[in-house]
Amino acid sequence: MNTRILTTLTFCAILLLTNRWLSYQEGIDILKAADTNSYMTIAEAAPGLPSLAPSALLPTNHTARFVVPYLVGTFVHLTGVSHERLFLLATLFFCGLVVWSVHRLLLEIGCSDSQYALAMALLIFNPYMFRYYLAVPAMVNDVVFVAGLALTLLGLVRGGLAIVLVGCLVAIAGRQNALVFLPALGFWMVMGEKWRIGGWMPSVMRFGIVATSVVAVYLAIGRVIAPFSVRGMEGDALTGFVRWLLVPSVGKLNILAEYVLRTVICLLFPIMILLSAALVKRFRGIKITAFFVWMPREFWLSMLFVAALYGFAFLGGPELFMSGVTRYVSHALPAMVLAFAIAMKRYNLFSDAEPSLMLALGALCAMGSFHHMTTFGGTTSDKAMYFAVMYCILAIFAGVIAFVALRQKS
């Protein structure tokens, strides 16, 4: 079997064997996955649509993600399999699609075996990427969005319009966030290496086809869900941070510090490793600013996706998003891993590092994946700060080991 496939399957097996598996109700009680009430209502009504009293209408930010819950409910109706089991199968499928898409991305840009293993470890062992959804499978829509994003990135790297279009449509079926990354998509389809053939006008036209399709599907979904929906928190999600800043209250600085930590922690491992690489280059006479300026264009185009999704997550503000902002930021992880892989390829990082140091890096990534709520059995969030501190320490150690590994090859 191919070494890279074996590596990925091993990482996935470790993830699955160490994850918590909660029932539908336990997901609501323990992980506060109240969104699943809306998704289950849609699934239980399939193959019809929910017919609800005015007081029981579902928020539009939930019902706009009705496609996969509706398909799950339809399969339940046809097969008699339980809703919980089919939600789990759907979650496993879309998690697998994320992994497969990133696998193909890493092959496309030509990573070495060690670079591939490190990038996959950063994806699969991120505690916010898959573990939550495996524990609460009815929250599958987030993974649907991430799978769509990963497919979109694969299409962009390959220069394939059809893959980009399919990826974007999958993403908008999962979450409305697909509208947020359309500007980043436009930049890539106009400026990306494999999209500039024939001039900028054909590139703009191709982007127009994709953007129009995404918006059209979004509007069509809005028409379908109108009879059983009531306006949700869409507006608050865009203005929450500004409104929170404008309201005077005590202890805002501490709240802001916690909020910033929660938004950054998901991406901390790749950030620390990249900073270590930049520091090694600094010792070799390359300024840290030059280290990033000399990155390929696709690095920055990938980071535009990260910035778009990070910014959207951050704008909700601590009052609205404090408990879930890390999970929202995790949606950008495929783009972050792609940017990280492009950086490794650009500077030939870790391609010839000592196996023992690469193993140590992988072990730190795996240790960091053991989230206190989705692995070994916490039932409350009282250990959240403890986990955050430990995760930051592990990320710092990863940066130190990366520095040592890269410094040895100077």
Image (tube, helix red, strand yellow):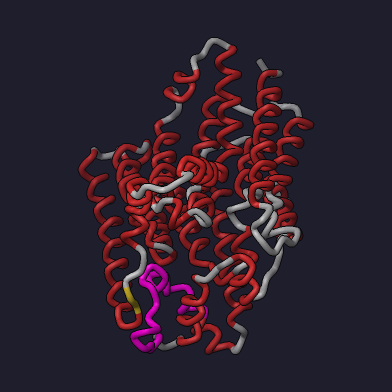
Q: Residue furthest left?
A: 201
Q: In the image, is 254 to the left or to the right of 235?
A: right
Q: Residue furthest top?
A: 285
Q: Residue furthest right?
A: 356
Q: Where are the magenta residues, as a range?
A: 50-72
Residue drawn at (45%, 44%) of the image: 252
Q: Residue 392 placed where, x, y %?
A: 64, 38
Q: Is residue 147 above or below residue 405?
A: below
Q: Is residue 52 above or below residue 369?
A: below
| Residue 362 in magenta stretch | no
Q: Residue 104 placed where, x, y %?
A: 55, 49
Residue drawn at (51%, 42%) of the image: 254
When asked about the image quadrant of residue 14, the answer is bottom right
Residue drawn at (39%, 46%) of the image: 311
Using the image as rendered, state which of residue 370 and residue 181 is in the foreground.
370
Using the image as rendered, state which of residue 218 and residue 98 is in the foreground.
218
When asked about the image quadrant of residue 381, the answer is bottom right
Q: Residue 309 placed where, x, y %?
A: 42, 49
Residue 40 in sight here:
yes
| Residue 71 in magenta stretch | yes
Q: Is residue 366 above or below residue 350?
A: below
Q: In the image, is 174 to the left or to the right of 29?
A: left
Q: Is residue 145 above or below residue 109?
A: below
Q: Residue 251 placed where, x, y %?
A: 48, 44
Q: Quadrant of the C terminus?
A: top right
Residue drawn at (62%, 48%) of the image: 126
